[in-house]
Amino acid sequence: PDAPDDGDPVATACAALQDAWKASNLMLRRAKLLMTDAPPPELSVPAAISCQASGAALADRPVASAAWPPSPAMTEAVPDDTQAFFAHEAMRGHNCIDCGLPDADWATVTFGAYLCVDCAGRHRGLGVHLSFVRSTTMDKWSKEQLRRMQLGGTQRFQDFLQCYPQLSVQPHGAAGLLARYASRAAA
């Protein structure tokens, strides 16, 4: 929408509401990708939605699911063999999303990112309503959970967090974890 007059609170509220509406529709179209194999119509990021990090439009930033044709991860079938999937992923060398340690062998299914054993323990302390944690080697995974990991990943989540400077720094302690994972952006 056109920039509202700074003195008109109604116009400012309407513009914010329109941006929120567009953002929610975009989120629903992205969620549809997880449930179907068909491409959604015109999946793109509206230029009016801005990234809080720099004021740059999200359309100017790489978004994993914003372009069609889909990335190779989106067109791959959901793996049947959990061990084979994570063995292949381990060769890519995932780092912990919170502390950066290499060879993370735990994951937060909620965010599709990898965790080291220490950070996984901290995430378990947050509760499953904020971060559902699984071991990549010991736990049984459903197809939906594997799909989240297949479409997600530590790097994609870090790219998302770059739009929110207060969330992109490595969290320290329980307060830092809560600030990041209980935020509206992460929800």
Image (cartoon, grey):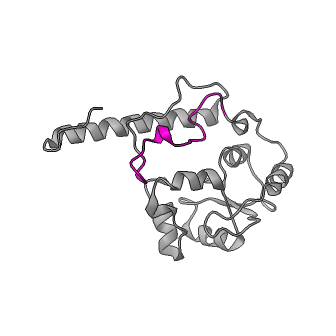
Task: Identify which residue is drawn at 56% across, 65% down.
Answer: 127
Query: Is residue 112 at least partly visible in the picture?
Result: no
Magenta residue check for 87:
no
Q: Is residue 13 left or right of residue 151?
A: left
Task: Identify which residue is drawn at 53% across, 51% down.
Answer: 160
Q: Furthest residue to the bottom?
A: 173
The quarter of the displayed image where residue 32 is located: top right
Looking at the image, is 4 positioned above or below residue 154? above
* Number of marks present in the image shown: 0
Query: Is residue 144 at least partly visible in the picture?
Result: yes
User: What secondary structure prevails in the magenta region?
Assistant: loop
Task: Identify which residue is drawn at 40% across, 51% down.
Answer: 52
**Horizontal and vertical percent for residue 66?**
56, 35
Q: Quadrant of the N terminus?
A: top left
Task: Identify which residue is drawn at 60% across, 72% down.
Answer: 122
Which residue range is magenta in the image? Answer: 51-70
Q: Is residue 20 left or right of residue 119?
A: left
**Horizontal and vertical percent for residue 46?**
43, 33
The quarter of the displayed image where residue 49 is located: top left
**Horizontal and vertical percent for residue 85?**
82, 49
Q: Furthest residue to the left?
A: 7
Q: Furthest residue to the top?
A: 41
Q: Is residue 187 left or right of residue 64?
A: left
**Horizontal and vertical percent for residue 116?**
70, 68
